[in-house]
Image: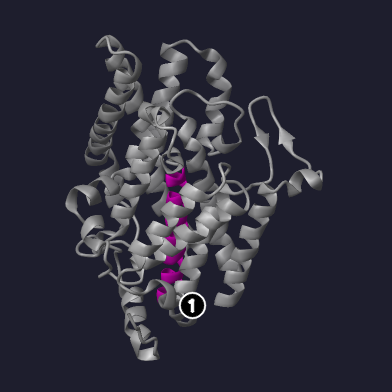
């Protein structure tokens, strides 16, 4: 297929991209990410050892990072374009209303259960780290809260990147260069530069604070894509690669093949390559709304699971715990129990997340938007 890449060919899509208030396929992408995470923690995962791709559900978190970096940076850049400046207070208010209610509910409820009800008082010293989003530095975890390390990575990013974006001049090349440099630093950290330089590190009885590594490279990759797409030159370059209708199919197939063929350890350069491929997959979904995967990613049940994926991520270990208890009391054991739990626990987790969204989270989401704007203006990010 021959495609013309004249200015007229990409100018209209670029304007449509800038005008797009809500990216319709991204809840479907969230669905794919959370399904990967659910499979990663499923007992049935341990029963499949011959296909490497099926052992890499954990990369769903990395894709969540790429998506988060893209959306947050896009919102900030569009606010800057629209108002001439970025409001840190407004940004932190929106993020707090989205992240904190369900997160604090989870941390408090689980801590009370394991420490107060189960009597595991030795876990008490871990609790403050969860409340200040430092779980990614902990030596151990309160049961059912191990997944909160990723929330800590995101909150640390939210704390630093918007302020840095404000301080940087509004020059796309400079911002892209800074983000690229930060990605390289993360790569060097993963390759052991911190140890080679003998950098100081702070250690407490509960945590070890070290130089950040690849966890941040994924979220920075998403931010880099947002910066490039926001500028006509960057958009034009990426349009050549990701702007055709079938690009998502090809790029997602390449990502799956990459995950299947890369070395067993996804550290260092393999992780960076994965992040870049994920960023290109995301780009192909947001550059145009009429791509080949849209019917799948906007299918109502898929989109709904994606919409509640934040709560589903927070609560899915609780769903797994409940399913394991049900299997035990039901007399199931061995592979039969593992596959039964694998099938049932996602449904329990979805039910919990749906209840949380409808009865708790949605109230706080409505507070993020000023009353005059609550009607008819969908947000770019949730």
Q: Which residue is denoted by mark 1 in the rendering?
A: 234
Q: Is residue 92 visible?
A: no
Q: Does residue 66 show up magenta in the picture?
A: yes
Q: Height in image: 203 above or below 60?
A: above
The residue furthest front is 50
Q: Quadrant of the C terminus?
A: bottom left
**Left or right: 207, with 274 as reference point:** right
Instruction: State the residue at coordinates (47%, 78%).
Output: 237
Q: Quadrant of the N terminus?
A: bottom left
Number of residue marks? 1
10 Å crowding of disc 1: few (<14), some (14-19), many (20+): some
Residue nearer the viewer, 272 or 143: 272
Dot 1 lies on which element? helix
Residue nearer the viewer, 114 or 321: 321
The boundaries of the magenta stretch are 58-83
Question: Percent from the top left, x then y, of residue 153?
Answer: 53, 45
**Left or right: 284, with 152 as reference point:** left
Q: Height in image: 224 above or below 160?
A: below
Question: Percent from the top left, x then y, of residue 54?
Answer: 41, 40
Q: Quadrant of residue 341?
A: top left
Q: Does residue 18 show up magenta in the picture?
A: no
**Left or right: 358, with 237 as reference point:** left
The residue furthest left is 300
Q: Quadrant of residue 334?
A: top left
């Amino acid at each position: 297929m021959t495609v013309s890449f004249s200015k007229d060919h990409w100018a209209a899509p670029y304007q449509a991209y800038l005008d797009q208030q809500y990216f319709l396929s991204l809840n479907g992408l969230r669905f794919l990410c959370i399904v990967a995470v659910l499979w990663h923690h499923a007992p049935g995962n341990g029963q499949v050892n011959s296909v490497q791709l099926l052992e890499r559900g954990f990369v769903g978190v990395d894709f969540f990072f790429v998506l988060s970096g893209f959306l947050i940076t896009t919102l900030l850049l569009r606010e800057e374009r629209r108002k001439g400046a970025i409001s840190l207070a407004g940004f932190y208010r929106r993020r707090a209303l989205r992240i904190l209610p369900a997160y604090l509910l989870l941390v408090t409820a689980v801590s009370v259960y394991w420490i107060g009800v189960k009597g595991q008082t030795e876990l008490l010293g871990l609790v403050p780290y969860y409340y200040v989003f430092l779980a990614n530095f902990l030596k151990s975890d309160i049961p059912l809260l191990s997944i909160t390390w990723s929330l800590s990575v995101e909150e640390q990013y939210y704390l630093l990147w918007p302020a840095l974006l404000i301080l940087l001049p509004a020059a796309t090349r400079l911002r892209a260069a800074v983000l690229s440099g930060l990605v390289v630093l993360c790569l060097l950290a993963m390759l052991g530069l911190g140890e080679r330089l003998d950098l100081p590190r702070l250690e407490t009885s509960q945590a070890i604070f070290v130089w950040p590594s690849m966890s941040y490279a994924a979220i920075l990759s998403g931010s880099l894509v947002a910066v490039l797409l926001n500028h006509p030159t960057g958009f034009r370059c990426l349009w050549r690669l990701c702007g055709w209708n079938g690009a998502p199919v090809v790029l997602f197939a390449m990502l799956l093949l990459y995950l299947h063929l890369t070395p067993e350890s996804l550290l260092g350069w393999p992780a960076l390559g994965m992040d870049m491929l994920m960023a290109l997959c995301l780009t192909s979904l947001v550059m145009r709304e009429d791509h080949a995967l849209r019917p799948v990613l906007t299918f109502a049940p898929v989109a709904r699971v994606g919409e509640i994926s934040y709560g589903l991520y927070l609560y899915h270990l609780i769903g797994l715990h409940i399913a394991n208890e049900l299997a035990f009391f039901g007399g199931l054991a061995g592979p039969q129990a593992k596959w039964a739990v694998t099938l049932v626990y996602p449904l329990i987790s979805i039910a919990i997340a749906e209840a949380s969204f409808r009865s708790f989270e949605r109230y706080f989401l409505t507070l993020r938007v000023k009353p005059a704007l609550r009607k008819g203006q969908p947000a770019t990010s949730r």
